[in-house]
Image: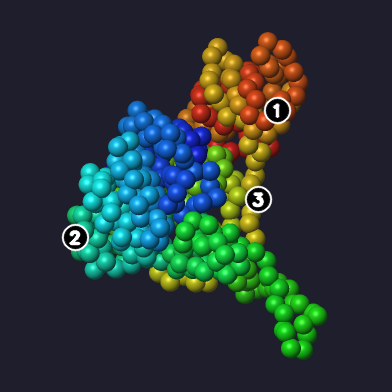
Amino acid sequence: MLELLMPAGNLKKLKTAFHFGADAVYVGGKSFSLRAYADNFTEDELREGVSYAHSLGKKVYVTVNIFAKNADLDAARKYFAFLQNIGADAVLISDLGLLAICKEVAPTLAIHISTQANTTNVETVKFYKNLGVKRVVLARELGYDEIAEIHHTVPDIELEAFVHGAMCMSFSGRCLLSSYFSGRSANRGECIQPCRWNYTITETERHADKPLDVEEDERGTYFMNSRDLRLLSHIPEIAKAGIVSLKVEGRMKSEFYVATVANAYRHAIDEYLASGKIKNERTYNEWLETVAHRTYTDAYFEGDNLDTICTDEGQQPEKYVFTAVVKSVKDGKAVVEMRNRFKTGDELTVLSPSDSANGKMFVVGEIFDGDEITDDAKLVQHVYSLACPNGVEAGDLLLKDAVMPRR
């Protein structure tokens, strides 16, 4: 089995990820997570998320991957015990001190080594295996041959790899730019992503009053700005290399992003497992073009590929307006929670894991606000109902001005 592992920045995204085919999600609590600006989960939400996942036969992994300071350790002990108590399926750790604490206070809690630990070789994987680690998330900087060698040499430990999403310009996230500019540490979950900014260069001695814009040319710019990873087309090789879990970056991304990327990779994985190849690879890659992203790259998977890692373009805009999420369907009428304004007469498109509904377009007719009819759904997160196409299910998304490519 190949596990599809999706990010979930909050409970809504967790449920969206599972609806669109994720086998597992990784989440962060309010502390100890390297995404301090994601919504993240309270303890009650973690408990609810784990319970919901297990009711579906799915898993939740909790990130505890900061580099801890002495002041963090007592709270970490309590947190690991809590995660074991609620039945979290694993924790992601990069700090060896936190690993030791976890084994001490939560001995039944599975440990996954975070990509933040920069695991790039056989001996390091052996070391973690001997510590009782269940899985290692390999550094993004590894290629197929290196991954395959690790699996061949240490076959009895699970290997996980990122296959999609944003990449850090620094080696596996070991970056000090955010600390320099803002005092907020990337290694403690507070990165402000200054590598994504546009810059000017100033020659301070002779031309201090004439800053030089950093412009694009045939050799590229955004000199600290990485392209986005996309390895959907390489799923067969990834599986052969020994990877058991395909991980998507993006705990701060939208529900639309989570739904679209999960849908594409779920379809691709299932086709590969059924036939040994991805029959509709082009279609699924087209789906991935509809979300906001930077130019895609295979990064290091086929070897050092630096010419295609540094981006030569800014971010590509989303080709959608995420309009509503379907809460329930009965007798051809959908109850939806509005996310962006829509009106009677608008054409909407269905985003669904079901081939029978995905890509269906329909014109909005009467919109019901309770027992009242309105022609303008304008209250964010308000619940409305409207007629919908056959096959639409709870959890599907409705999009405006975006046509999902059909299979």
Q: Establish if 202 lies above or below 273.
A: below
Q: Residue at x 39, y 30 (%)?
A: 52
Left or right of 71: which side holds 351? right
Residue 317 — which label? Answer: 3
Q: Quadrant of the N terminus?
A: top left
Residue 112 drawn at (x, y percent): 31, 52
The residue nearer to you, when weighing 78 against 266, is 78
Q: Which residue is mark 1?
A: 379
Q: Residue at x 58, y 61 (%)?
A: 193
Q: Quick one: label 2 or label 3, which is nearer the N terminus?
A: 2
Q: Establish if 73 lies above or below 225.
A: above
Badge 2 crowding class, 10 Å Cα cut-off, few under 14, some 14 to 19, many 20 or more, is few
Q: CA distance from mark 1 to mark 2?
A: 55 Å
Q: Is residue 17 visible?
A: no
Q: CA distance from mark 1 to mark 3?
A: 24 Å
- Three-letter residue code for mark 3: Pro
- Three-letter residue code for mark 1: Leu
Q: Are marks 1 and 2 in contact (CB under 8 Å)?
A: no
Q: Look at the numbered disc 3 and give the secondary structure of its residue.
A: loop
Q: Look at the numbered disc 1 and give the secondary structure of its residue.
A: loop
Q: Tell me the quarter of the picture where residue 161 sits.
A: bottom left
